[in-house]
Structures are given as C-alpha cells and as structure tokens.
Amino acid sequence: MKRIIYISTVNRHLSEEEVESIGQISARNNHEVGITGVLIAVHDYFFQVLEGDEDTIANVVERIRRDPRHRDMHILKAETGISERLFPKWSMRTIRLAKSGDVILQAIRNLLQNIAQSHRIIERYTQPSVLKFLTEGINPLTVPPRKTEKIVLFCDMVGFSYLSDLFPVEEVADVVNAFLEVCSITLVEHGGVVAKYVGDCIIAYFEEGQADECIAACLEILRRISEMRRNTHNCHLMKFLYCGIGVAAGTVIEGNFGSSVKMDYTVLGGTVNLAARLEALTHEIAKPIALSKSVMEGASRPWPFALVGDLQLKGSSRPCPVYTLDHPLLDEFKGHTDLVEEMRQVCGDGVCGVVCPQTPNG
Ligand SMILES: Cc1cc2nc3c(=O)[nH]c(=O)nc-3n(C[C@H](O)[C@H](O)[C@H](O)COP(=O)(O)O)c2cc1C
C-alpha cells in the first residue's frame, strides 16, 4: 500500500459549501476504490493524507493534481510498502478549520503557509527527476546508476564571459535569468528535462523517441530569443543575446554523481560530451544548431537537415558527421567575433547600459 501526504494552496477562495462538496465527492469516490485518509481545510490551504493501493493512489493523486481549484500542490511525503493505514475508518474525513478565528487555527495556518512556501522554494532548486522520485515515494539516493538512451542538449549564450565584463552586473543577471527561463520553459513545454545549469549553459535531455520534439524545441528557442532581441533597447545586453545549441543522441549513464557535500542526479558519458562539443562547434560553423547523425536518424518529421561536413571534434579519434538545419531562424546567428563587431558598431567603445542612452528600439 501507499500513503501520500500533500499540502496545497487554493486558486481562489472556496466557500464552506464547496469544501463540504469536495469532502462528500471524495468520500464517495474513495470508498468505491478502497482509499482512506483525511482532508483538512485551513483558510486557503488544504492538507490531505491519502492511503490505499499504489495504482489507485497514483490515479486519484493525478486527478486531484489536475483539479483547477489547486494553485499548487506539494507532496510532503510519499511512502510505499506500508502495511497499516493511519485512518482505516475514513474514506475521506473532511475537517474545515477555518470556521473559527481561534489563535491555534491561526498558528496552524501559518505553519501550513510556511511549509508550502519552503517547498515552493526547494522545488525550484531541485532537479525535476529528483522531485519525481520523491513524489513517487522513492529515495533518490538509493536509485542505482543505469545505462539509458537519451537525446542530450547543451545550450549556451554566445560570448557570455566577454559580454558580462562590459555590461552592468544587474543587466547581466537579468539577461542570464531571462535566457535560462525562456530556454527551460521551451524545453519543458516540448517534453524535455532540464538536468542542470552550469553558469549560462543549460544541460537538458529528452527520451529516446523525442528527436522531433527536441528539434522543435531548438527552433522555438531561437524564435523566442530572436523576439527578445527585437523587443529590446539598442544598447541593452539583451540586444546581443544569441545562443549555440548542440544535440547528440545515444547511450548515457543516468544516476547519482557527486560527493557527501553535494549530489547531482544527472547524465554522463560519451553522448553528453559529444553534445557539449557540438555546442562549442556552433561558433565555428556559424550556425546556432549542431546535431549528431543519431539525432537526425531519430527524427521522423521532414526537417530541413543539412550536412555541415565530417568534422574533427575535440576528444574524438575520427571526424564525425555534423548536421544543422536549413531554416531562416538559423541565419540570424552571430558567433563571438561577429557579436563583438556588432556591439562596437551599435554602442561604440563605451560600456553599454552605462554610457549609452537607452533609446527605444529602432
Ligand atoms: C483539496 C482537494 C482534495 C480532493 N480529494 C479527493 C479525493 O480524495 N478523492 C477524490 O476522488 N477526489 C478528490 N478531489 C476531487 C477531485 O479533484 C475531482 O474533482 C473528483 O475526484 C471528480 O470526481 P467525479 O468525477 O466523481 O465528479 C479533491 C479535490 C480537492 C480540491
């Protein structure tokens, strides 16, 4: 059996009748499938314990998660293999604490508020794969390393070190965050997993059969970044935001790598190195996307693939075929040298953002 304990914030204020109705529907549904537990409503927070057969719990939790009345939901604890229920007699006993203005209730409300807030923060710092294990009741530290097939993607800002020395630190931080945000959201929207950030570089991966989604995500990243450049003041760092993306598909080792000080759940191996090398190569081939042959072979949609050539990559014993896409979005690319030249033309030799007037775009 499995037990899930979660806390959630409501999307809007729920009336007493609505909470009662949730309780009634829950009790009826849960009784039918052998789920027991308790639901506590305190002001804008719900605290719920659900226990029952593993698959049934997974279905119900998924249904509750999709309920539009939740703003967010944080799994506090997921236990598998439990043999005894905490609430064997309650299909879903619902307790509404917000009815009275008691100080104890106020304290409970603060407690739930703090727990929800801490989880919201911790979740943003935690890798999605680790969160997934935790919500499934698996201790990520006990997951053994395994070989799997993945499509690995590296995406990096062009000339970041150079640019970061020239622009005000706040502007650099804003642009790096905007870049990481737009890339990460796009990758996740297309089904990818953001494994980690290394400075201004994003390392992400897709499952073996997702080459089309991965390529679509690459093009969408370029489109969104192009739009960000267009909508920016002339002398703002964002105006010079370009990125290189390297993608390779193949075998990786997925698992926990790290030390007693810090642990990463990530992917390692030749495919990961190849993706990094392909990303570095984008500057040389003057195209923002460089793909391995395996990515091209894994795709099924009619993408405009173009062979760049058999290129010698650092660390590899023989030349390997590198592909890009023949697409107008890729023509906007600027490598490091072109970028520096453009910056000089637009901003002169002054420090941008400090000496240049912030004139509107165009
Ligand atoms: C805080 C909260 C807790 C809920 N708990 C349960 C539950 O334990 N069991 C359940 O079947 N539905 C629960 N629901 C309701 C589901 O989200 C969903 O509306 C309901 O299962 C649909 O049931 P129906 O198809 O019978 O109308 C909960 C909803 C909220 C907002």
Image: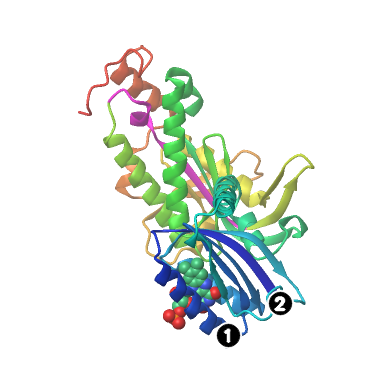
Q: CA distance from mark 2 to mark 1?
A: 16 Å
Image height of 90 relative to 203, above or below: below
The residue nearer to you, when weighing 227 against 283, is: 227
Q: Is residue 324 something that shows in the picture? A: no
Which residue does the numbered mark 2 point to in the structure image? 1
Q: Amino acid at mark 1?
A: His
| Relative to 269, residue 209 above or below | below
Nearest to the observer: residue 203 or residue 26: 26
Choose top left, top right, bottom left or bottom right for residue 128: bottom right
Residue 92 magenta: no
**Residue at left 68%, top 56%?**
254
Residues in magenta, as a range = 234-250
Query: Does 352 appear above or below 212?
Result: above
Q: Which residue is mark 1?
A: 31
Q: Residue furthest left?
A: 362
Circles 2 and 1, Cβ within 8 Å, touching? The answer is no
Report x, y in % for residue 65.
Answer: 50, 66
Disc 2 residue type (three-letter): Met
Instruction: Please state, as top left, top right, bottom left or bottom right, where the N terminus lies in the image.
Output: bottom right
Rendering coords of residue 183 (x, y %): 44, 46
How packed mark 2 is, by other alpha carbons closer than 10 Å (few <14, some 14-19, many 20 or more), is: some
